[in-house]
């Protein structure tokens, strides 16, 4: 059934019917906000973080319009940070991969690309070929593609594929290195191979939360949702590192069972593991700590344990993985 389109005055009345109060904003200020700063569909999605009254499921408990606005703002800042972090992760993962290939006497930089392409299933191969043809039309990739399309070296290939395709190639390389290193008995490199594979699983989560952020989707609007699938998809490395923060097992399981929380923390963790530039890391650390300071600037969310404990976990992870020295 289609819902009736509401004018702005009706939107305010609809929020009031849902038990949402207007203590921080007057109704006139809220109306102006909905007209010029956000929209009801997006803003009201944050109500999923709140409980409803026991005997009146149509109304929410302890939910003020100002808290919805605050969450929308905090979310907006986080999306911007995640986009920057994802760019850095992609760049430094490529740097590390090229370093590994450049120092390996078994790799010439060409065979690893052709072997990867030949390993793809027909559907995957078709997807990659379509992607390369699309990127060949870009003024930023066209010349490189035309010059190397018949025999592409790895340093060109990774620059003209998407982040998603790079992650797939990254996994192929890690498994290839692992096979070679197991045969040679090089334990140090085997540990590097395992770290690469661990980073691959973390980067899968980064890709998803990066895509959501790039499309300006809300990412902090459903922190109560918990699924077994989300818990199973969470990297064991993330689970281990969260445990090191002092998070109890019950609380940890609850948090990683929310796909949004798990993916955001995965982004934080893989950045900590992959980015090797002290200057770049320090800049993102300062940005993250500024964001943490913004979390409780206007509301302490003391009446909402879901939000409070989630924000505390984000703060703990940032304090530990991104210390400001």
Image (cartoon, rainbow, N blue to C red):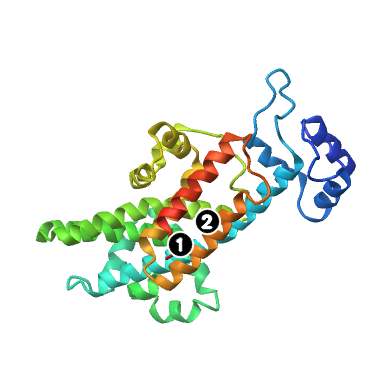
* Residue 210, disc: 2
Q: Residues within 10 Å of mark 2 (few under 14, many from 20)?
A: many
**Left or right: 210 in relation to 15:** left
The residue sitting at the front extreme is 325
- What distance separates the C-alpha of mark 2 from that of mark 1? 10 Å
Q: State the residue at coordinates (74%, 45%).
A: 66
Residues 300 and 5: in front is 300
**Left or right: 107 in relation to 274:** left
Residues 195 and 16: in front is 16
Q: State the residue at coordinates (84%, 40%).
A: 12
Estimate the x, y position of residue 223 in percent, counting from the top left. Answer: 56, 39
Tag nearer the camera, 2 or 1:
2
Mark 1 falls on what kind of element? helix
Q: Residues within 10 Å of mark 1 (few under 14, many from 20)?
A: some
Where does label 1 land, which residue? 163
Classify residue 155 by image quadrant: bottom left
Q: State the residue at coordinates (77%, 44%).
A: 40
Estimate the x, y position of residue 249 in percent, counting from the top left. Answer: 38, 34
Classify residue 179 by image quadrant: bottom left
**Left or right: 50 in relation to 227:** right
Instruction: Give the mark nearest the N terminus, 2 or 1.
Output: 1
Estimate the x, y position of residue 83 in percent, counting from the top left. Answer: 54, 61
Are the two marked residues, 2 and 1, in contact with CB atoms closer than 8 angstroms?
yes
Please say if 281 is above or below 244. below
């Amino acid at each position: 059934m289609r819902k009736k389109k509401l004018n702005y005055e009706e939107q305010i009345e609809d929020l009031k019917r849902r038990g949402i109060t207007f203590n921080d904003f007057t109704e006139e200020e809220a109306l102006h906000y909905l007209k010029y700063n956000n929209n009801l569909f997006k803003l009201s999605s944050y109500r999923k973080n709140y409980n409803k009254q026991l005997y009146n499921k149509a109304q929410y408990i302890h939910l003020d319009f100002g808290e919805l606005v605050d969450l929308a703002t905090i979310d907006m800042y986080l999306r911007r940070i995640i986009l920057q972090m994802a760019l850095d992760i992609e760049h430094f993962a490529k740097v590390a991969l090229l370093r590994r290939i450049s120092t390996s006497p078994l790799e010439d930089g060409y065979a690893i690309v052709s072997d990867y392409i030949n390993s793809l299933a027909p559907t995957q191969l078709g997807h990659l070929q379509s992607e390369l043809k699309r990127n060949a039309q870009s003024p930023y990739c066209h010349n490189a593609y035309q010059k190397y399309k018949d025999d592409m070296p790895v340093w060109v290939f990774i620059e003209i594929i998407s982040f998603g395709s790079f992650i797939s190639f990254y996994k192929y390389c890690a498994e290839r290195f692992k096979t070679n290193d197991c045969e040679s008995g090089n334990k140090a490199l085997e540990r590097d191979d395992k770290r690469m594979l661990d980073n691959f699983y973390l980067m899968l989560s980064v890709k998803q939360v990066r895509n959501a952020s790039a499309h300006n989707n809300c990412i902090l609007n459903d922190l109560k949702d918990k699924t077994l699938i989300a818990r199973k998809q969470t990297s064991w490395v993330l689970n281990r590192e969260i445990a090191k923060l002092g998070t109890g097992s019950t609380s940890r399981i609850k948090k990683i069972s929310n796909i949004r929380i798990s993916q955001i923390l995965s982004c934080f963790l893989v950045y900590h593991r992959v980015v090797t530039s002290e200057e770049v890391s320090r800049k993102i650390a300062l940005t993250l700590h500024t964001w943490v300071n913004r979390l409780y600037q206007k509301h302490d969310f003391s009446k909402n344990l879901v939000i409070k404990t989630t924000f505390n976990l984000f703060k703990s992870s940032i304090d530990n993985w991104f210390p400001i020295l």
